[in-house]
Amino acid sequence: MGLALCRQSHSHTAKVVLVGLDGAGKSTLLHRLQRGELAHTTPTVGFNVGSLELDSGPELTVWDIGGQGGMRAQWGDHMEECDALLFMVDGVDRVRIGEARAALGRVLGDERVRGVPLMVLVNKMDLPEAMGLQEVTGGLGLEQCWDRDWEVQGCSTHNGLGLQEALDSLATLIRKR
């Protein structure tokens, strides 16, 4: 799953498009950030939208776009004037890291996000079988990502681990741009 931050008409709000493969925890992330609690979600068909106020940066409007194969073609429809991208990865899904790499590559190849900073959130880091951040970085081919600032952070939407740090880093990426 991932987020893309896009400018709104007022300068203190950033539109965030959250993308990544299905099952990575995008909707759970949005719910936890909005309400501060764990929610049991169902696969997103279409999108969910929510607002977040950050102490460390701009107000965010978050667009959680479904990650099923058929929905991925619609991700680009939400990338206009993006300030940052957030891509969410299921940290225990080694089998689909290549699929995640291909999906991220399509997002980063979109002209509308050329040079836009990228944050990758690796979810489920609270589980013992979770991939390390270096493994995810290599699996996604981020070393080849020279045309933008990028960062990889671990988190857990289940228990909130790393979410505040991720939001602070995301705000920093937005400010740097």
Image: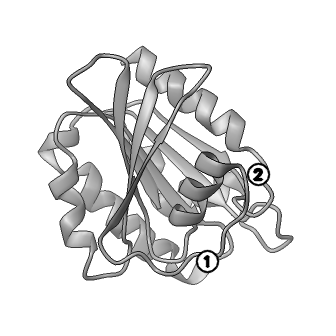
Label 2 secondary element = loop
All told, the count of numbered labels is 2
Horizontal relation, residue 146 to residue 98: left or right: left
**The disc label shown at residue 64, or none:** none
Residue 177, percent across and down?
A: 36, 19
Q: Are marks 1 and 2 in contact (CB under 8 Å)?
A: no
User: Camera-side residue: 41 or 170?
Assistant: 41
> Mark 1 or mark 2: which is in front?
2
The amino acid marked with disc number 2 is: Gly
Q: Is residue 51 above or below residue 96?
A: above
The residue drawn where x is 79% and y is 49% is: 161
Indicate the quadrant where residue 41 lies.
bottom right
Q: Position of residue 4 (x, y in %)?
A: 36, 44
Question: What residue type is disc 1 on?
Answer: Arg
**Element carrying mark 1:** helix
Res 94 label: 1
- Residue that label 2 marks: 160
Q: Residue, x 13% and y 43% (percent of image)?
A: 111
Q: Measured from the top left, where is residue 146 in percent x and y?
A: 36, 35
Q: Is residue 50 above or below residue 136?
A: above
